[in-house]
Amino acid sequence: MLHRREFVKQLLFERGDLLVICGLGTPAYDVAAADDDGSNFYLWGAMGSASMVGLGLALAQPDRRVAVFTGDGEMLMGLGSLATIGVKQPPNLAIVVLDNQHYGETGMQPSHTHSGVGLVDVALGCRFKQARSFEKAEETALAREMLYSRPGPLFIHAQVAAQQLAQVLPERDGVILARNFTDRLRTGGRKS
Amino acid sequence: MNLAERSALDWPDVIYSNFRRAGIRQVGYVPDAGLSRLIQLCQSDPEIADVLLTTEEEGIGLVAGAALGGQRAAILMQSSGVGNCVNMFSLVKQCRLPCLIFVTMRGEYAEFNPWQVPMGSITDACLRLCGFLVYRIEKAEDVADVVAAACDISFDSNQLVAIILSQRLIGRKRWNN
């Protein structure tokens, strides 16, 4: 099993101009802990929409790579969006699911993946160019190579340990989050 | 064909020309018979990314992502799809992003399928409760003005805007009964 926070930190290390959309809940704390950057957009609600926000952004910014970080529960609520992405075949979009097989925000109730529902199989069935599961820290370099070098749509399935970590809370106000993101995009990328 | 009949046939073309004028670059849709001509026009335009959705709520995420990326987008759906979107509307409302949707009505004028009536009868009120400005169009001759104004207020003033295309405007759905 992967340590979720360490895996996200490694994926976002030297991220260049990668744009990040983050689904609600624990993945937001992982991303905020790794790199709370203006090129991150955090969803605090609208559960099930993270992948579609990623698609809209990837279509609007075809020269930038877009990564969606989300959890198994949020992904399960928007499974149809994988079919929608499969039709559009955005080469610059990656979906990264941090799968702890539980709903961490609501008391660690088991999710569908806990009963063996396979998200990688769903992504492959939806015509993702590459979909792969990762469970060992030694595989992180391969996940990075996928995220930054391969043509999408990509599906990175991270099997992470079900552990409760300290919450690292990013900004919550949607207007500020959207403004930070669009300002950063307009001014061209990385913080100094 | 008289002028009124001609303009009734042309309303999808009028909406499409407004998409071009407003610079809309992404159009998400769940197919509907009343929207078929407009969907075809979007599909045949290389400047517009047409995005076939599995459910209407995906469209709300799509337009939010487009806005974050600096593009304008619109969503096409049948009235039943409005109910599917309710919680997703919180995304565009909370982030004060423009959201322009076109809703073809079912469950009102000359409806054959009673299952369309429950959602059709609350579509307008539901949209307003969710924070939308709602413009209902009954006549083809009103399409050009109303759609142009709706595009302007949505994108220039960052508003949630719904254009309701009435069932009478779209015409009766034919059933083989």
Image (cartoon, coloured by chain):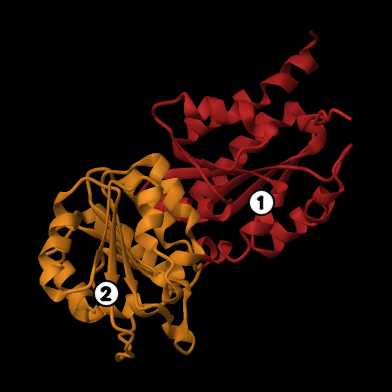
**Apparent colour of chain B:** red
Identify the residue at horizontal 19%, vertical 57% (top origin).
Answer: A147
Q: Residue furthest front?
A: A116
Is B9 left or right of B98, judged from the image as shown?
Answer: right
Q: Position of residue A57 (x, y in %)?
A: 35, 51
Query: Which residue matches tag 2?
Result: A31
Identify the residue at horizontal 75%, vertical 54% (top origin).
Answer: B123
| Mark 2 vs mark 1, CA separation in Å | 33 Å
From this viewpoint, is residue A24 visible? no
Which image quadrant: the N terminus of chain A? Answer: bottom left
Q: Position of residue A149 (x, y in %)?
A: 14, 51
**Apparent colour of chain A:** orange
Quarter location, residue B32: top right
Amino acid beneath label 1? Gly
Q: Position of residue B167 (x, y in %)?
A: 80, 37
Is B160 left or right of A129, judged from the image as shown?
Answer: right
Dot 2: chain letter: A
Q: Residue furthest top?
A: B1
Q: Residues within 10 Å of mark 2 (few under 14, many from 20)?
A: many
Amino acid beneath label 2? Val
